[in-house]
Image (tube, rainbow, N blue to C red):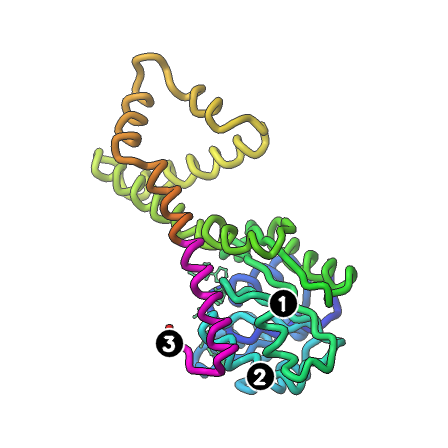
Amino acid sequence: MLTHKRIGFIGGGNMAEAMIKGLLSASFIEAKNIIASDVVAERLEYLKHEFKIKTTTDNHELVQKSDIVILAVKPQAMKAVCTSIHEVVDEKKLVISVAAGVPIHTIESLLNPEADKKVGVVRTMPNTPALVQSGVTALSASDHVSKTDLKVAHRIFEAVGRTVDVPEAQLDAVTGLSGSGPAYIFMIIEALSDAGVKMGLSRDVSNILTLQTVLGSAKLAQDSGRHPGQLKDMVCSPGGTTISGLHTLEKGGLRTTLINAVEAATQRSIELGQNAEKNNSQNGNDSQ
Ligand SMILES: NC(=O)C1=CN([C@@H]2O[C@H](COP(=O)(O)OP(=O)(O)OC[C@H]3O[C@@H](n4cnc5c(N)ncnc54)[C@H](O)[C@@H]3O)[C@@H](O)[C@H]2O)C=CC1
Ligand SMILES: O=C(O)[C@@H]1CCC=N1
């Protein structure tokens, strides 16, 4: 679906690039209708060259030239960015944040310090597989966001993967699971590929076997709808190879380690939000 709305990304880093590439590959929007801003000139040069989008170093200009503004800077930069654009953000703009942790009410009050307009914010947590239209994004909107605008936000993220609605309080857990999750999986992929090499396979063959195993297992779990435990049992022959491997994974605490990782990342997301809020109410400097 082609949109004629203009989308502006404040912050042209990894997440913005994943979305820009995903949206263009999905033919959701034409490059001429995307604009990105950044404080790093080389980054803008790269984005302009790679995707033929418009760029600027001026966040005011970006907001003025966009119908939809996507806040894609680090949580630590959100205060400065929102404060610097509040004069040019009006009720007609749809503002979407992808920042980990930073609560909707913090963003809204930074964008609307006089509380004299209806600025609505959709807070989201996407992930980098958006690059290949296989992302997943959780969304939560404030009461100031119209149903139509929320639908538009969904369409943007649906163009680069799947979407789910969650209450805002659950977005930190989403961050710990699917926002950070690709990094966990890449670490597992790297380790499995190394394991194949250790056992004598070439790196190329080991990579193919690893990637197709991860991809195929996810597809099987998704398409079959079966419980992962049942699918795991299907691989384990009595007295066979897999159960020996699983025993080793249990001894290494794989499940506990993964649960702990999601818990730690969730906690960090909560902390980032609390810091953003503290700095907002104290009007002080960001210490992260
Ligand atoms: N990388 C990921 O996998 C995901 C990131 N996020 C969120 O996306 C946001 C961005 O993360 P990344 O893209 O990974 O970070 P990044 O560091 O790659 O990109 C942030 C960009 O913002 C730019 N920037 C800093 N101050 C600015 C300002 N005042 N005006 C304009 N641009 C400015 C930086 O130069 C940088 O290029 C974060 O809030 C993060 O929590 C959310 C989901 C996944
Ligand atoms: O590591 C981070 O803080 C960001 C948020 C989710 C993924 N990357």
Can you tell me whether the CB of the residue at mark 2 lies under 8 Å from the nearest atom of ligand 1? yes
Name the front one of labels 2 and 1.
1
Label 2 or label 1, whichever comes before in sequence order? 2
Residue 110, by quadrant, is: bottom right
Residue drawn at (58%, 67%), measured in percent from left and top? 97
What count of labels does the image hold? 3
Residue 121 screen position, x and y as percent: 66, 68
Inspect the image, locate mark 1, and give the three-letter code of the amino acid beneath it. Answer: Ile
Label 1 or label 3, whichever comes before in sequence order? 1
CA gap between label 2 and label 1 equals: 15 Å
As for residue 58 lying within the magenta part, the answer is no
CA gap between label 2 and label 3 equals: 23 Å
Mark 3 residue element: loop
The residue singled out by tag 3 in the image is 287
Q: Nearer the viewer, residue 135 or 84?
A: 84
Mark 2 residue element: helix
Please state the extent of the stretch shown in magenta in the rendering: 265-287
The residue singled out by tag 1 in the image is 96
Residue drawn at (62%, 82%), measured in percent from left and top? 62
